[in-house]
Amino acid sequence: MSAALPSPSFDRNEVRARFALDYVRDRHRRLIAGEEVIVHCHHYNSRIQRTVEGAAGIDGKAIFRTAARTAFLRQITAGFRDGDDETARWAVAEELFAELGYGSLDLADPASDTVHQSAGHFVEGWGVAFADQSKPVCTLAEGFIEAAFMAVRGESVEVRETHCMHCGASQCSFSIRRGVEAWTAPSRPARRESVSTSADAELADSNIDDNAIIQAVVGLPIRGGDDGLIPAFGVYLANTPADFYNQVAIEFVEAMSESGQRETACRLLSEAGESCAMNTFRGIMDSAEWEALVAPMLQEPADTLFALVALSNAFGWGNWRITEHEPGETLEIVSFNGYEALGFLESRGQATQAQCWMLQGVSAGMMALVYGEGSFSERFGTYLTEEHDCIAKGNTMCAFAVEES
């Protein structure tokens, strides 16, 4: 085993500055190192992982790991600068992982057969949602480390988690196996962007200043702290490449479809989105930030729904607007450039069916959160969403109709 690399020849603050957020206001897009990133919390990320990896008859871990490897390879590489030595390039990978909110990786000794992680976003997520299940949960980190070796050294390695804090270990450990079959990341699909704008639909009125909410949220430092985690709004947030989510969802549906389980796969993805809305937004609504910024705008229950939509736009989900709403009963909402529909177009071409599973679930979850009664489990599934138009099908916008189930 070789010794670790020499002492750092880089400025850590300068490396972190390479990952400054660029928010594209007219499209509601968050960019870090050239990649569109989506803000989601540990509730959604752990549930989408459990959904994919827990499905019988498919290799869900491979889907999750490979999607991470592909998306993060591009993002790590984009953080490199002319003149970076190998030590600096490993630092770029470490700092990107932390900046995005996924935890703290130690990549200081790339010649070692083991990489350690002292804090993990998925450890936090599974600890809250699935504490009764004991298994290694840091599959995304496996893919990230594989991407880091390829980005820094052009080396194909196989990474597997051997010890996990979710299972009681003091730190997560990943074995590095060299000499594996070489892999090449697929090229990034040509970017597509919807030309639709809010002028293409008649929007419903509210008492909410959505621009003020968006501006305030975009101004928040949603970036990893010293431990690489982002505690905010009562949850742990992470900035994840949209391409990662899209590849996971598309390949999961395709794999499940091979055994005649497409409808089940789509329902499970939507349920993860519904859980995301109820848990993430509940935490936000209980936060000091909400009390200071949003609460003064609220004059009636429907205003809460409009405020949540503004927050989702600030999180990079797209340009999402309410067109009709009957409080407690129905909701009509449109998306002019949702990342799911555009991602499907980019990687698979035009679809014959709607593709926005997360937004379908979130639409129902927001209605249940705002108007439902009882515990979360009692509210879950009380509203249903139909996506009757979808950009992935060739429509000019995605349109969702929500009503009580």
Image: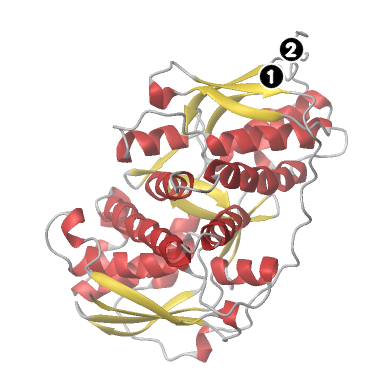
Q: Which x, y percent locates residue 342?
A: 61, 71
Q: Which x, y percent locates residue 68?
A: 62, 44
Q: Which secondary structure, mark 1?
A: loop
Q: Name the kind of residue labelled 1 in the image.
A: Ala
Q: Name the kind of residue labelled 2 in the image.
A: Ala
Of the numbered discs in the image, which one, if any, rests on residue 108? Answer: 1
Mark 2 vs mark 1: which is more N-terminal? 2
Classed neighbour count for the residue bearing mark 2: other residues with Cα under 10 Å, few (<14), some (14–19), many (≥20): few
Residues at marks 2 and 1, CA–CA distance in whole angstroms? 6 Å
Q: Which secondary structure, mark 2?
A: loop
- Position of 197 compared to 185: left or right? left
Q: How is the image coloured?
A: secondary structure
* Residue 365 seen from this side: yes
Q: Which x, y percent locates residue 229?
A: 47, 35
Tell how many labels. Answer: 2
- Position of 248 compared to 323: left or right? right
- Position of 171 compared to 233: left or right? right
Q: Is residue 80 above or below residue 52?
A: above
- Residue carrying label 2: 4
Q: Is residue 387 above or below residue 141?
A: below
In the image shown, does 309 or 121 lie closer to the viewer? 121
In the image shown, does 219 or 252 lie closer to the viewer? 252
* Residue 213 seen from this side: no
Q: Which residue is situated farthest in the left direction here?
A: 374
Classed neighbour count for the residue bearing mark 1: other residues with Cα under 10 Å, few (<14), some (14–19), many (≥20): some
In the image shown, does 337 or 298 lie closer to the viewer? 337
Confirm or deny contact between disc 2 and disc 1 (CB under 8 A). Answer: yes
What residue sits 26% from the left and 73% below the top? 303
Q: Which x, y percent locates residue 188?
A: 75, 58
In which quadrant of the rendered image does the C terminus lie? bottom left
